């Protein structure tokens, strides 16, 4: 690597390396990686660009830049990701939370405010919780709520538990090892899930950052991408409290098919939300006779 002797020079080198390798967000990724290596901030880059860089920092930066060029996502390299203002650890068996999923969180919170307000003791079930992102985002806004995060992966549940503790929600978060509803007990005011919804044939077309680093079973759901929704629709009403809601993230072209699966099981579509790109991204259902 070039002999970058200062923070400013290291940032410039990292950005140029990533850009030359065709990384689309080279500037952002370079900044995140260099800040991680040097334990600095954006303010440091502006106010102290001449801060000296050590040999160890240069070597560490080289290692991380090489990983990013090889296709490892920047947040996998860092080991954490921000979601809805929370800092979340990642692990091999957790899906990296994406900004699109914040659409689901916001849609659920809109319904919560309409149904009774943020201060009620809401009971939340997050199916396929992964890092705990959705459950913890809801707990961060709903001070009296309690959440159960269910997942088939013990590794994911350990990560979710650590994230709950790290974000001050540990006393209101319960981890449950379960294949969807299999080991879940009780009824919930809010059932929420970002289930797998990629079609089997589309797996090979996903970006290398997703295909080689996100867990496959958290993404792929059969030939039509609807297997998880079928189970959620068929079994969800047995775990939903009176007046409760069931909310899911969907693929951009799945609104009609997913809505059809739920209406066949007696649900009614209450609300839908679009992501920042304008794509259908989240649906909220209630019992068919709900107002």
Image (spheres, helix red, strand yellow):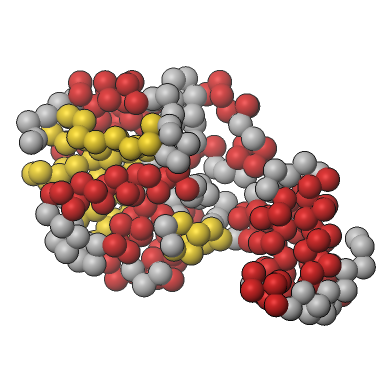
Work out whether residue 200 or residue 111 is closer to the camera in this orientation and state it.
Answer: 111
Residue at the spot 68% in from the left edge and 68% down from the top edge: 35
* Image quadrant occupied by the C terminus: top left
Work out whether residue 114 or residue 137 is closer to the camera in this orientation and state it.
Answer: 114
Residue 253 drawn above or below residue 285: above
Q: Is residue 232 left or right of residue 212?
A: left
* Residue 164 appears in the rendering: yes
| Image location of residue 33, percent across then percent down | 70, 62
Q: Is residue 49 left or right of residue 74?
A: right
Work out whether residue 93 or residue 69 is closer to the camera in this orientation and state it.
Answer: 69
Q: Quadrant of residue 58?
A: bottom right
Residue at the spot 39% in from the left edge and 25% down from the top edge: 254
| Image location of residue 49, percent across then percent down | 77, 74
* Residue 183 appears in the rendering: no
* Image quadrant occupied by the N terminus: bottom right
Which residue is at the far front? 47
| Image location of residue 271, percent across then percent down | 24, 36
| Image location of residue 9, percent across then percent down | 84, 67
Q: Is residue 4 left or right of residue 251?
A: right
Residue at the spot 16% in from the left edge and 64% down from the top edge: 119
Q: Quadrant of residue 233?
A: top left
Residue 216 drawn above or below residue 44: above
Residue at the spot 67% in from the left edge and 68% down from the top edge: 36
């Amino acid at each position: 690597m070039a002999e970058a002797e200062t923070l400013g020079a290291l940032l410039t080198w990292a950005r140029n390396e990533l850009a030359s390798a065709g990384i689309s967000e080279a500037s952002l990724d370079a900044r995140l990686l260099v800040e991680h290596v040097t334990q600095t901030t954006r303010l440091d880059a502006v106010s102290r660009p001449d801060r000296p860089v050590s040999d160890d920092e240069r070597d560490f930066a080289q290692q991380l830049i090489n990983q990013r060029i090889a296709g490892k996502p920047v947040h996998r390299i860092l080991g954490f990701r921000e979601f809805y203002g929370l800092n979340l650890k990642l692990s091999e068996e957790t899906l990296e939370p994406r900004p699109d999923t914040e659409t689901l969180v916001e849609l659920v919170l809109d319904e919560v405010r309409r149904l009774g307000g943020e201060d009620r003791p809401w009971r939340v079930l997050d199916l396929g919780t992964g890092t705990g992102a959705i459950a913890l985002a809801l707990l961060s806004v709903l001070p009296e709520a309690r959440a159960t995060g269910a997942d088939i992966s013990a590794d994911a549940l350990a990560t979710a538990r650590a994230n709950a503790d790290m974000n001050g929600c540990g006393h209101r978060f319960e981890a449950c090892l379960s294949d969807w509803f299999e080991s879940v007990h009780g009824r919930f005011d809010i059932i929420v899930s970002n289930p797998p919804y990629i079609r089997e044939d589309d797996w090979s077309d996903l970006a290398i950052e997703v295909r080689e680093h996100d867990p496959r079973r958290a993404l792929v759901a059969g030939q039509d991408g609807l297997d998880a929704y079928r189970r959620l629709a068929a079994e969800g009403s047995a775990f939903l409290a009176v007046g409760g809601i069931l909310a899911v993230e969907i693929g951009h072209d799945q609104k009609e098919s997913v809505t059809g699966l739920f209406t066949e099981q007696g649900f009614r579509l209450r609300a839908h939300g679009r992501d920042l790109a304008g794509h259908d991204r989240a649906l909220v259902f209630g019992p068919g006779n709900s107002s």
